Image (cartoon, rainbow, N blue to C red):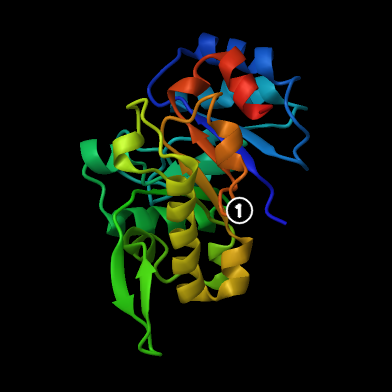
Amino acid sequence: MRVPMIAGNWKMNKTVAEAVAFVKQVKDQLPPASQQETALAAPTLALVPMVSAAAGSPLKVMAENCYYKDSGAFTGETSPRALYAAGIHHVILGHSERRNYFHETDELINKKVKAALANDLCPIVCCDDTMGRRIAYDQKIHWVVNRILADVKDLSEDEVEKVTIAYEPNWAIGTGQSADPDQAEEGCYLIRQTISDMYGSKVANNIRILYGGSVTTKNVGALMAQPDIDGALVGVASLDPKTFLQIVNH
């Protein structure tokens, strides 16, 4: 059974005090972790205080990014080893804003995924709706998600099962225009089919796939009802505690 996940991605929002106040407001109103994982990704400055504030609750605190080296002369970057030591066990990698604004490539993201896994961090790897075609060895044509082929390149079956994938169509991120449930399901299904082509159906059936892109209180129920959508990566709607709780407890 794939445990669903609702994860808020705050991006570059909230002070440390605001982040801690948010955690205290929501932490006692979340579903049990055995039924659904609930997480918040926050700016690096707020992570350690949020972990302390969330202690004893089902809430998981996530990093929004990390580097692919554990230490060294990399001014301004965040060490995956340091994140794990601070109690952070999840990290978002390859978000479209990182790709677009900071020119992150699939090759770089693949290095980050491997570094995260090496430090026992669970990567949430984002991909958009860039699709492609390839011909399998049996000469049948399969639709595949090119970005996922590159981002999880050279991972073992055990490693890839620890990865969560977030499907985020570029045109839906921060626009208020969400994919309808059928469109979102198609994208998540194609990702699962890509993983099946790469690693087999057992691995594909175990991997968790989220939808992200203008998720709201009005559409989260219909999205979560789709067979290949295992949760949501929520942007602006996660900034308000009442709205976030409504989405989490949809």
Tell me which residue sits at (42%, 63%) in the image. 152
Answer above or below: position of 163 versus 99. Answer: below
> Left or right of 69: which side holds 244?
right
> Left or right of 4: which side holds 198?
left
Tell me which residue sits at (40%, 26%) in the image. 11
Answer above or below: position of 52 versus 184. Answer: above
| Amino acid type, label 1 | Pro
The answer to which of 249 and 80 lies nearer the viewer is: 249
**Residue 88 showing in the rendered view:** no
Answer above or below: position of 204 versus 81. Answer: below
* Rendered location of residue 216, percent (x, y): 51, 25
The answer to which of 133 and 87 lies nearer the viewer is: 133
Answer above or below: position of 150 versus 184. Answer: below
Tell me which residue sits at (49%, 50%) in the image. 185
Residue under numbered circle 1: 227
* Rendered location of residue 33, percent (x, y): 75, 38
> Left or right of 156: which side holds 145?
left
Tell me which residue sits at (32%, 63%) in the image. 146
> Left or right of 200: which side holds 100?
left
Tag 1: Cα neighbours inside 10 Å, few (<14), some, or many (≥20)?
few
* Rendered location of residue 37, percent (x, y): 67, 39
Element class at badge 1:
loop
